[in-house]
Amino acid sequence: MSKALIVIALGLLLVGAPVFALRPVCQPLSDEDLKSFNTPIELRTDRDFWVKIFQKRGDRWFHCKTWISRQFFF
């Protein structure tokens, strides 16, 4: 029984940790931030792993990165 629990816990950890670390975290960009871009934000195609970094939701722009990227590189 205890071996089965260890295997299940290890499996959950191996699947859960990357899912948690690679989830997108987005922060709204201020108007000042938008004005400071050399390349217009509409033309940027930057990506962080699989997440498009600059996303427009409604009428606001957001700066999105994976959780792990935010922790190491903000």
Image (spheres, rainbow, N blue to C red):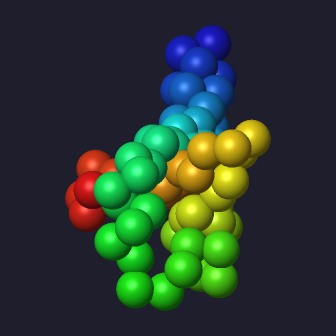
The one of 32 and 57 positioned closer to us in this rendering:
32
Count the numbered circles shown. Answer: 0
Residue 59 relative to residue 62: left or right: right
Q: Is residue 12 left or right of residue 31?
A: right
Horizontal side of residue 27 vs 24, given as left or right: left
Asked whether residue 21 appears in the rendered view, the answer is no
- Measuring 57% from the left and 63% from the top, which residue is drawn there? 54
Q: Considering depth in this image, is 20 or 51 the residue closer to the camera?
A: 51
Residue 26 in percent (x, y) is at: 51, 44
Which residue occupies 47% across, 42% down? 28
Front position in the image: 46 or 50? 46
Query: Which residue corresponds to the image point at 74% horizontal and 41% vertical from the top-left?
Result: 58
Q: Quadrant of the N terminus?
A: top right
Which percent across, then down, holds residue 51? 63, 62
Residue 25, given in percent of the width and then of the height, sits at 50, 43
Which residue shows up at 55% across the image and 27% down it? Answer: 9
For the C terminus, the image quarter is bottom left
